[in-house]
Image (cartoon, helix red, strand yellow):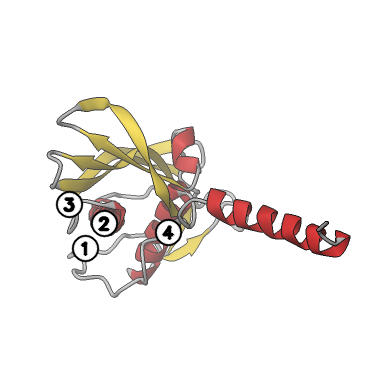
């Protein structure tokens, strides 16, 4: 018995839908740094800056995407590998920029963007060298953040310093890496505030 045309169309449509569902992979999981908690420690010397312009962080192109990367130091330390189904909800350069601005603002400094600043205000530039989860073994990893901070007034470089922080991941997966990288970023923010507190800012 021939199949009615309408029924045949429905069967064909159902086949396409089932095929489409079967071809989809796992749904990606997205991470960020989580809520901003109060600073665990307050630097002994506060930055001598009532106002600071903080430019958005610069870095390699792979940090300007939402992919999460890790390195297997025990296998091939030169190869950076992306997680297949885990992503940052915002590129790391943006996550790190926002966390540093928030932490500096928590110290009492008024933070401005480059578009809001007036000429001659102190400007902090951040260049990120590394932001990755590193596996020493198959079951142990840590989050590593390394950046270079440069403070300018006008076109004059006041000082420059490199900061690096690492922290153990609570689990050998993307979730553990995200938590470790958030903690390392917060630690660098504290180091940055201590450094700013040691500087003498020349007047215009």
Question: What's the CA distance linking mark 3 and mark 1?
Answer: 25 Å
Q: Which mark is residue 29?
A: 4
Instruction: Mark 3 or mark 1: name the one nearer the start of the chain.
Output: 1
Q: How many marks?
A: 4
Percent from the top left, x then y, of residue 70?
Answer: 30, 40
The part of the image, by quadrant, that contains residue 75 is: top left
Element carrying mark 3:
strand
Residue that mark 3 sits on = 167
Between marks 2 and 4 in the image, the one whose residue lies nearer the viewer? 4
Q: Describe the element under mark 4 as helix, strand or loop.
A: strand
Q: Position of residue 139 (x, y in %)?
A: 13, 47
**Relative side of 57 to 42, left or right:** right
Q: Classify 10 Å Cα crowding around label 1: few (below 14), some (14-19), many (20 and above).
A: few
- Sequence order check: which comes first, mark 2 or mark 4? 4
Image marks 1 and 2: residues in contact by CB distance under 8 Å: yes
Say few, some or many: other residues with alpha carbon within 10 Å of mark 2 (under 14 / 14 to 19 / 20 or more): some
Q: Quadrant of residue 109?
A: bottom left
The answer to whether marks 4 and 3 mark residues whose Cβ atoms lie closer than 8 Å is: no
Q: CA distance from mark 2 to mark 3?
A: 24 Å
Q: Which residue is mark 1?
A: 45
Among the two numbered marks 1 and 2 on one chain, the one whose residue lies closer to the N terminus: 1
Which residue is identified by label 2? Answer: 197
């Amino acid at each position: 018995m021939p199949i009615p045309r309408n029924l045949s169309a429905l069967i064909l449509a159902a086949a396409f839908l089932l095929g489409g569902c079967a071809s989809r992979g796992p749904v990606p999981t997205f991470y960020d740094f989580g809520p901003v908690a109060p600073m665990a420690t307050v630097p002994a010397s506060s930055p001598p800056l009532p106002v600071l312009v903080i430019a958005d962080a610069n870095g390699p192109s792979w940090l300007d995407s939402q992919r999460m990367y890790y390195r297997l130091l025990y296998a091939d330390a030169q190869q950076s590998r992306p997680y297949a189904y885990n992503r940052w909800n915002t590129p790391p350069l943006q996550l790190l920029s926002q966390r540093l601005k928030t932490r500096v603002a928590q110290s009492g400094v008024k933070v401005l963007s480059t578009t809001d600043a007036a000429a001659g205000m102190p400007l902090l530039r951040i260049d990120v060298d590394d932001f990755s989860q590193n596996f020493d073994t198959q079951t142990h990893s840590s989050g590593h953040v390394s950046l270079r901070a440069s403070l300018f007034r006008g076109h004059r470089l006041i000082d420059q310093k490199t900061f690096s922080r690492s922290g153990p991941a609570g689990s050998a997966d993307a979730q553990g890496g995200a938590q470790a990288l958030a903690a390392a970023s917060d630690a660098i923010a504290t180091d940055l505030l201590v450094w700013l507190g040691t500087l003498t800012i020349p007047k215009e």
